[in-house]
């Protein structure tokens, strides 16, 4: 980081996404899916659906795309679920330039509304923060599974500051610019910890004990604030390997089968 980098540039970089194309594994999976579109924020966004049975929406994390959730999707298809995947804007093939939290929330809420009879949402990493903070009263979903989710936007700013060697004055300036762009309530609106205090639906919080990106203490706090949740720690697992873990896939499918009216 340049010492002369402006606060505006720092905030832009904080919200900038590494756009990765779908790899052959993801493309092969999508070839088996039906493609649909929905409208949010005046734009059209694509999502993909495969299988039959109770619907599970899968939400990927930052700087990846829907392909990171295909392994879990395959497991759920084998268990008799319908899976829905999409590229969070502006990842993969989705529109957009930066990870605008208001745009992402609008797309998720449009999906929640579109997917009638939504059985569950399974989300990984930043996808957990996005999915939890988009949840609102009236969503017809039965449960949520949060895998390695960060607790809040404030936490992410602190991590960004640490990684870029920002001093206290620069951190305050970045926070003030984020508030200017998204409102003074941005920290509360985009806090998973705040969101779960209002969520009535049950949840499963899964976290690796060796996660050095989002320390396991944050999963413990998320569980403590989510009154109808279960905490499952995966010994020795890190942050980015969770969605590929056979143990995690088994835990997720077992939890969903244990909900009311599991697939026959």
Image: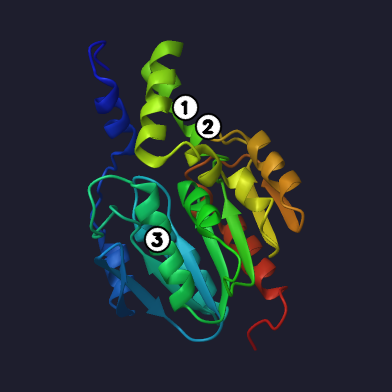
**Spatial CA span between label 3 and label 1:** 25 Å
**Depicted 199 relative to depicted 139: above or below:** above
The answer to whether residue 119 is above or below residue 5 is: below
Q: Tell which of 110 and 77 is nearer to you.
A: 110
Dot 3 and dot 2 residues touching (CB under 8 Å) = no
Q: Is residue 20 left or right of residue 226?
A: left
* Callout 3 secondary element: helix
Q: Tell me the residue that label 3 is attached to.
A: 106
Which image quadrant: the C terminus?
bottom right
* Residue 107, position as x, y percentages in the image: 38, 63
**Gap in angstroms between the C-alphas marked 1 and 2:** 6 Å
Residues at badges 1 and 2 in contact (C-beta under 8 Å)?
A: yes
Tally of numbered tags: 3
Q: Residues within 10 Å of mark 3 (few under 14, many from 20)?
A: some
Q: Which mark is residue 155?
A: 2
Q: Earlier in the sequence, mark 3 or mark 1?
A: 3
The mark lying in front, picked from 3 and 1, is 3
Q: Which residue is label 1 attached to?
A: 159
Give the mark nearer the N terminus: 3 vs 2.
3
């Amino acid at each position: 980081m340049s010492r002369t980098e402006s606060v505006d540039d720092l905030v832009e970089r904080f919200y900038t996404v590494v756009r990765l194309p779908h790899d052959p594994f993801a493309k092969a999976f999508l070839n088996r899916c039906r493609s649909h579109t929905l409208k949010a924020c005046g734009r059209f966004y694509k999502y993909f659906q495969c299988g039959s049975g109770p619907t599970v929406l899968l939400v990927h994390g930052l700087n990846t795309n829907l392909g990171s959730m295909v392994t879990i999707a395959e497991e759920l298809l084998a268990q008799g679920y319908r899976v829905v995947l999409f590229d969070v804007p502006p990842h993969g093939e989705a529109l957009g330039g930066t990870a605008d939290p208001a745009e992402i929330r609008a797309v998720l809420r449009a999906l929640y509304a579109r997917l009638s009879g939504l059985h569950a949402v399974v989300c990984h990493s930043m996808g957990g923060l996005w999915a939890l903070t988009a949840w609102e009263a009236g969503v017809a979903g039965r449960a949520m599974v949060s895998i390695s989710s960060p607790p809040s936007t404030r936490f992410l700013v602190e991590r960004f500051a640490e990684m870029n060697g920002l001093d206290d004055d620069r951190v305050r300036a970045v926070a003030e610019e984020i508030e200017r762009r998204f409102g003074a309530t941005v920290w509360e609106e985009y806090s998973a910890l705040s969101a779960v205090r209002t969520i009535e639906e049950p949840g499963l919080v899964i976290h690796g004990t060796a996660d050095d990106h989002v320390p396991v203490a944050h999963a413990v706090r998320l569980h403590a604030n989510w009154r109808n949740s279960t905490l499952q720690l995966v010994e020795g697992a890190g942050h980015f390997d969770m969605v590929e873990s056979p143990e995690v896939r088994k835990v997720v499918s077992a939890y969903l089968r244990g909900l009311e009216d599991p697939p026959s």
